Image (cartoon, rainbow, N blue to C red):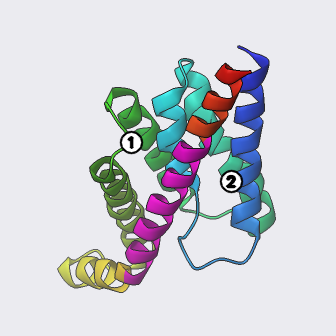
Amino acid sequence: MSKEEIKVIFGLIFIAILTRLLPHPPNFAPITSIALFSGFHFSNKRIAILIPLVGMFLSDIFLGLHSLMPVIYLTFILISVMSFYIKTLSFANVLLASTLFFVFSNLGVWYFYYPHNWGGLSACFVLAIPFFVNAIAGDLFYTSVLQFSFKKIKTISFSL
């Protein structure tokens, strides 16, 4: 692994921690984007999976550990693995990742905090819609920033 890759890895983990600890709208965070970006760009797939998880865990130490952590972390693993197979970080792929997070995280919320019936399931998902809107906005924003920055850094590196 090159020095540049190591810098990018630590930079992504730092961004994940910092943006989760600073005030932000609920679910407007870069973790899904980092999972997509890492899986798409890094050849070492173990590292690609670990990057968003390490960022999440280190920030969760400060924000608080909770019962949904296994569900949330497994969802980010799924998103990272999905990104191994995509051809581009397109709008559709970002939307798919946002939707996967929405569905799996809310199934976890429903399981732990709502009655296990149709009413509980529908209430859980309906109440989560504002968070889904924020997640889509954040995922589109952070994926664009990461992809644009990465392309610029690669252009600058190759021109030196």
Read off the residue under disc 1: 89
Q: Report which quarter residue 69 is drawn in.
A: bottom right
**What is the x, y in percent for residue 146?**
57, 47
Q: Nearer the viewer, residue 130 or 67?
A: 130
Q: Secondary structure at mark 2?
A: helix
**Alpha-carbon span between mark 2 and mark 1:** 19 Å
Q: Residue at x 33, y 28 (%)?
A: 85
The span shown in magenta is 130-149
Magenta segment includes 136: yes
Q: Is residue 70 visible?
A: no
The residue sitting at the left extreme is 118
Read off the residue under disc 2: 16
Badge 1 amino acid: Leu
Q: Is residue 130 visible?
A: yes
Q: Could you tell which of marks 2 and 1 lies nearer the N-terminus?
A: 2
Q: Nearer the viewer, residue 78 or 33?
A: 33
Residue 149 appears left or right of 6? left
Badge 2 amino acid: Ala
Q: Which mark is residue 123?
A: none
Q: Nearer the viewer, residue 100 or 85?
A: 85
Q: Residues within 10 Å of mark 1 (few under 14, many from 20)?
A: some
Viewport quadrant of the N terminus:
top right
**What is the x, y in percent for residue 143?**
50, 51
Q: Nearer the viewer, residue 53 or 28?
A: 28
The number of callouts visible is: 2
Q: Report which quarter residue 150 is drawn in.
A: top right
